Image (cartoon, rainbow, N blue to C red):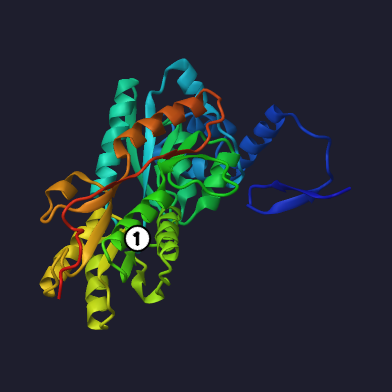
């Protein structure tokens, strides 16, 4: 007979003979006993902790939830609480990437959080805002696992689409703002990033710009799709993409400042910038001015998002508008559909190019 593994209190696994298949309830009881042994507590304490009972202190609840994830213990307390109307809270998780330092005060995050909060309020639910390390997206399930929330809305896939698939495989009720990926098990809501990138660069090429820089981290699924749109527009006009003009960067203003300065210092010619956020675009414009470059006369600039500040910037920023307000409502609607037991398909929302003063034909020299 093939050996299988069983957890013991010392954290090691022991081989034992394969037994007849267990029922789901029996498997769950065995998993709970394993968690209790690993945590050094009773099974009743594990049960209370996974139900979010205040009798168990917060530190112990978190430790038990982490062990439950490690043995793929499926917790149904969220759905149970929703049915009993005992929990009317949804966790909204914004990952934090230590290397980039992007803060939750980023205008895109604030607007998205506001739209989600409004949609939850309309349903009579509260929002629990949480942050997790972008390298440990599986930790986004903690509010659900501990019973503090009925489900999770995650803002962004970052670099770990695989971890999100693992959460979906153990049936954590979750929707994600992000790009539709191959072999995706979870529901995403996001913008048509490919079309947005294509439209931005098509507009710049139509204005006579030929040396178009791209600012963004193409390791992120959404940005990778914007970059694909950028490349398609260049190829359509028989313009060879120049690797020196593709500048990887996080969504942090300081990165755009450094990138513009570096292009100028290295005497790399460019007459336009397509930046993957409005914050990056506006920072690039300020840096160009400091270096004596005029926008749009010398360098045309297109941003992404259409945050409120974009229309009031000087000069007003041409940008690709994401449906952020509609996106928040769509995320909430999709999560409640998942909670109702429905299979929710990924949704792609349209983007729109908003033309303002940072793009114009190049001046005659």
Quarter-wise, where is residue 109 in the image?
A: top left
Pick whichever, 345 or 254, lies toward us. Answer: 345
Q: Residues within 10 Å of mark 1 (few under 14, many from 20)?
A: few
Residue placed at 35% from the left, 21% from the top? 123
Image quadrant holding the C terminus, namely bottom left
Furthest residue in direction front, as rendered: 364
Q: Which residue is mark 1?
A: 98
Residue 171 visible to an observer of this rendering: yes
Q: How many marks?
A: 1
Quarter-wise, where is residue 293 in the image?
A: bottom left
Residue 40 visible to an observer of this rendering: no
Furthest residue in direction right, as rendered: 1
In the depicted structure, whether residue 304 falls above or below residue 31: below
The spot of residue 326 in percent (x, y) is 33, 33
The spot of residue 186 in percent (x, y) is 53, 40
- Give left or right: position of 92 versus 137: left
Residue placed at 10% from the left, 55% from the top? 314
Pick whichever, 238 or 112, lies toward us. Answer: 238
In the depicted structure, whether residue 78 falls above or below residue 256: above
Residue placed at 52% from the left, 46% from the top? 164
Pick whichever, 310 or 76, lies toward us. Answer: 310
- Give left or right: position of 318 versus 216: left
In the depicted structure, whether residue 74 falls above or below residue 337: below
The spot of residue 357 in percent (x, y) is 16, 55
Q: Secondary structure at mark 1?
A: loop
The spot of residue 134 in percent (x, y) is 41, 54
Furthest residue in direction bottom, as rendered: 266
- Give left or right: position of 52 versus 361: right
Quarter-wise, where is residue 135 in the image?
A: bottom left
């Amino acid at each position: 007979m093939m050996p299988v593994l069983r957890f013991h209190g010392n954290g090691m696994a022991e081989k034992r003979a394969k037994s007849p298949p267990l029922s789901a309830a029996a498997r769950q009881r065995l998993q709970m006993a394993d968690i209790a042994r690993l945590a050094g507590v009773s099974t009743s304490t594990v049960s209370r902790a996974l139900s979010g009972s205040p009798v168990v202190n917060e530190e112990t609840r978190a430790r038990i939830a982490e062990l439950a994830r490690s043995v793929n213990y499926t917790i149904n307390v969220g759905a149970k609480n929703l049915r009993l109307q005992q929990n009317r809270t949804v966790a909204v998780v914004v990952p934090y990437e230590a290397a980039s330092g992007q803060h939750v005060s980023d205008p895109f995050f604030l607007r998205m959080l506001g739209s989600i909060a409004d949609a939850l309020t309309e349903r009579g639910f509260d929002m629990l805002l949480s942050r997790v390390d972008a390298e440990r997206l599986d930790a986004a399930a903690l509010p659900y696992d501990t019973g503090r929330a009925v489900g999770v809305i995650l803002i962004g896939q970052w670099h770990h689409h695989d971890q999100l698939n693992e959460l979906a495989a153990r049936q954590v009720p979750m929707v994600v703002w992000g790009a539709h990926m191959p072999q995706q098990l979870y529901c995403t809501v996001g913008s048509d990033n490919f079309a947005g990138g294509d439209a931005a660069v098509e507009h710049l090429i139509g204005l006579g710009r030929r040396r178009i820089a791209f600012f963004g981290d193409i390791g992120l699924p959404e940005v990778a799709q914007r970059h694909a749109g950028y490349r398609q527009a260049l190829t359509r006009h028989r313009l060879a993409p120049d690797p020196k003009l593709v500048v990887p960067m996080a969504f942090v203003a300081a990165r755009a400042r450094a990138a513009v300065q570096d292009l100028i210092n290295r005497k790399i010619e460019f007459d336009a910038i397509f930046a993957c956020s409005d914050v990056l675009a506006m920072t690039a414009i300020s840096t160009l001015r400091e270096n004596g470059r005029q926008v749009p006369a010398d360098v045309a600039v297109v941003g992404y998002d259409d945050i409120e500040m974009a229309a009031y910037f000087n000069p007003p920023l041409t940008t690709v508008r994401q449906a952020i307000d509609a996106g928040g409502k769509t995320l909430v609607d999709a999560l409640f559909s998942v909670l109702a037991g429905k299979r929710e398909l990924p949704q792609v929302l349209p983007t729109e190019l908003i033309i303002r003063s940072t793009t114009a034909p190049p001046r005659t020299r």
